[in-house]
Amino acid sequence: MKNVTQQLRKTRDIAMVKKEVIGNRLTDSFENTANITLFVIRFFKELFSFPFEFNEFLVQCYKIGYKSLSLVGITGFIMGLVLTLQSRPTLAEFGAESWLPSMVALSLIKEIGPVITALICAGKVGSGIGAELGSMKVTEQIDAMEVSGINPFKYLVITRTLACTLMIPLLIIFADVIGLTGSFIGTNIRGDVSFVLFFSQAMASVHFIDFIPPLIKSVIFGFIIGIVGCYKGYRVRNGTASVGKAATSGVVTSSLAIFVVDMLVVQITDIIS
């Protein structure tokens, strides 16, 4: 009887611990949601206030855009090449090889290009922003800026978020163009198609309306990567050990948000069309 009572107590204690853990996780989730909402609201308030750190904005555009060209270009080229090589045998079975350029172009422009490029930028740019701002936070550089009369939010967060919002759509366009070039090379590995003919066939099925949803997604992806990276870095606590956690958490959060936004935009576009 005593053993049964002890076992019941242990079971009850385990259940209470599980409830407490679940409750703490829910509380943390709601708290993080509220904090990032307030962070976004502050961003839009500070965005339209004077002055604007234009020089820092240009520096961040250079770092985020130009410094990412090589990685994005290589990724886009491989995407176009691999997609072509893998799709060609299937299309050849149905005698539809002539549809290959159009299929690759639509796939890259509407879905693969924006999502894959945004994920690459989330890993490279988002983690870099989170680690940079986190390091500045724990070394009290942000506090020193406030003491000096500089608004660190405008100087650090506004410039980086706007740079991401502007440059990542441009990087996605660049990746699409390089991806089509890779597809052209992949097509000519086992065939002989001229450059003009390939791009004429690729653009034959692409209409102006097809560019609007990817453009909207690209802008939202850029904003998400910038604001999440800045939020995670700006709110670093408990020393340098939390800097790496902030960078990793920023990448994970940005990646999940990119998939969610992509799903929503695809659903809305499908309903409208």
Image (spheres, rainbow, N blue to C red):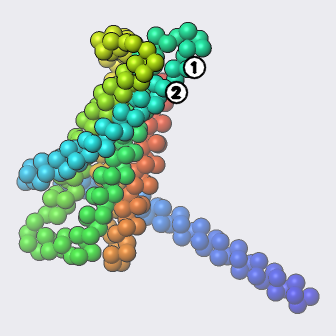
At label 1, the amino acid type is Thr
Secondary structure state at the residue bearing disc 1: helix
Q: Who is closer to the viewer here, 156 or 169?
A: 169
Residue placed at 43% from the left, 54% from the top? Answer: 253
Q: Who is closer to the viewer here, 75 or 5?
A: 75
Mark pair 1, 2: CA separation: 8 Å
Relative vertical location of residue 1 with respect to residue 100 in this rendering, above or below: below
Q: Who is closer to the viewer here, 105 or 19?
A: 105
In the rendering, at what x and y percent does residue 15 appear? 71, 73
Which residue carries the number 1 mark? 90
Residue placed at 32% from the left, 34% from the top? Answer: 175
Secondary structure state at the residue bearing disc 2: helix
Neighbour tally class for label 1: few under 14, some 14-19, many 20 plus, Cα within 10 Å: few
Q: Who is closer to the viewer here, 224 or 181?
A: 181
Residue placed at 44% from the left, 55% from the top? Answer: 252
Kindly identify which numbered label has been placed on residue 234: none
Which residue carries the number 2 mark? 86
Mark 1 touches mark 2? (CB < 8 Å): yes
At label 2, the amino acid type is Gln
Relative vertical location of residue 136 with respect to residue 39 in this rendering, above or below: below
